[in-house]
Image (cartoon, helix red, strand yellow):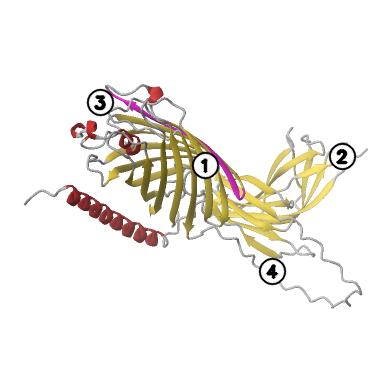
Amino acid sequence: MDSPGPTGSLVLRVKALISASIIGLIGLLVSSAQAEDSPLPSSAMVADGIDGLPGLYRLPLLAEPAPRLSAGAWFNYGYTEPQNDTDGPHHRIAATGSIGGTWWRYVELALRYDVRHDMHPGDEDGRDSGTVVDFTPLVRAGLPLGPVRLGAEGRFLFSGAGQEHVPGPTPEGRLIINYTRPSWWVSSFVGYRTPFFGHDDIEADRLRAGDRVALGVSEFSTLTTGLGVMKDFSQLSLLGEVSWDIAVGAGAPPVGQSPLRIGVGARRALLRGLNLQALVEVSPGGRAPSTSTDPLVPIEPRVAIILGLSVRLPNLVQKPKPVVGPAQPAKPVEAAPVVEQPPPPPPPKARVLVEIVDEDGHPISDARVTLMRPDAKGDPGSVYEVPLVELNRYAVGDLEPGVVELSIEADLLQSYTQEVTLVGDAEQVMSIKLRKAVAKEGQLRGLVRSFSGQGVAAKVQVTPGEREVFCDEQGAFELDLPPGTYTVIIEAEGYLAQKRPVRIRKDGVTVLNADLQRSH
């Protein structure tokens, strides 16, 4: 058979690219549907980066295992200054589409397309503008270890799909380290990228100057690295990141001429799971020579403006529905006043965030966390379930201010009860350590302080049973008690005594804190 010509080769490349994309998308949709049957906890609603998986812009964030399917579209304009005395400025209009999701537990898969149209100054051969299509499948796996998350990523860049002189693909492997705290994310990675397959046989001198700027591939091995941070302000997030692709090996350009990218931007949640993102990225480093006799190296736009939109399906983080307690008797209808007054504005809502670990510091993700708000008589009233939103973090919002009782139960661990005062327009953050379950008795423990915050070495007496214990210098005390209802009397020289009712549960811990007022 005759070998296919340039047109036939292009058709074969496009057909192979479309076939690989369809197969990958079908596998991703099937795996995402299977993941919905998994009882794994849902991930935090961190929006997706350019790769279609949780991240900043370029830098990855390792998500919790959760059934999800994500998609994104990115548009940008880039400017590159002239590369030699006879050259002019280069302009780039580009678009990226990506789709990703959970493959199995902590394993994620994504597909990404990049379409770039570069407009270059003309040369002796005429105009030198054209379009390049890149295709990148990638797989990412990670494991959360408390606030630190470790992972790895592998990807193949099929660069310049449809171009006659670019055989590709380019493989790359990365090691990822993330650090997370409430409303903070820090991402870093280090990786290694080999030259694209067939780089030794490429006829680089056949590429025009504009093609070298547009192509974005390297004939050298590359050490890739990046560092980024993101701060969340409820519906708005601010982010910044730095990434650097350092060419290595014999004949590689100096480090200062390797592509260095610095980006800053913001992310706005339009709806739950729908995010709008805008960034500005600059490349302040030097430029490697790009004449026809020089090896191929990537040349990044000097300045790029990026706008993106990402969507996450399904929306797994739902607001809890309160379990309403006994119905209250109806109140008599009062006569309407002559002049109707506008209703007062509703009080600002409160939010509760609880982080739970065991005695060894291991995160607890299967606890049953509830909030109980007593009624006017002190009896149990409305009960709210606090759902798991991330690893060992349980959160609930839109709560009325006031006093509630926090209860935590987990298998093989002591139950935990604490009275919490919710303040409007504020978040109550608590870190709870659960002890191993005891055989028979419950436990009462707490902290006695003065109004100035100093610990008080008070005497704590419990009736009935006439059991007592003295606080240490910091005001802390512990006392094991059988299950039941007790009266606690707290006394200290120079302070007014307090009496407090408590309820001790079997195999549970009840926390009682007290602030004493001086007697003079």
Residue at image location 42% in from the left, 50% down from the top: 52
Q: Type of residue at label 2?
A: Tyr
CA neighbours of label 2 inside 10 A, class few (<14), some (14 to 19), many (20+): some
Q: Relative to 436, is 249 on the left or the right?
A: left
Residue 40, quarter of picture: bottom left
Question: Disc 1 vs disc 3: Cβ atoms closer than 8 Å?
Answer: no
Q: Type of residue at label 3?
A: Thr
Q: Give the residue number, with chain letter if any, for mark 2.
A: 495
Which callout, 1 or 2, points to the residue nearer the camera?
A: 1
Q: Give the residue number, with chain letter if any, for mark 4.
A: 325
Q: Give the residue number, with chain letter if any, for mark 1.
A: 279
Magenta highlight on residue 264:
no
Residue 152 visible to an observer of this rendering: yes
Mark number displayed over residue 293: 3
**Cα distance, mark 1 to mark 4?**
49 Å
Indicate whether 158 appears above or below 84: below
Question: Disc 1 vs disc 2: Cβ atoms closer than 8 Å?
Answer: no
* Residue 344 in picture, x, y percent from top left: 82, 62
Q: Earlier in the sequence, mark 1 or mark 3?
A: 1
Mark number displayed over residue 400: none
What's drawn in magenta, residue-wise? 234-249
**Cα distance, mark 1 to mark 2?**
59 Å
* Residue 67 in picture, x, y percent from top left: 43, 57
Which callout, 4 or 2, points to the residue nearer the camera?
A: 4
Q: Residue furthest left?
A: 1
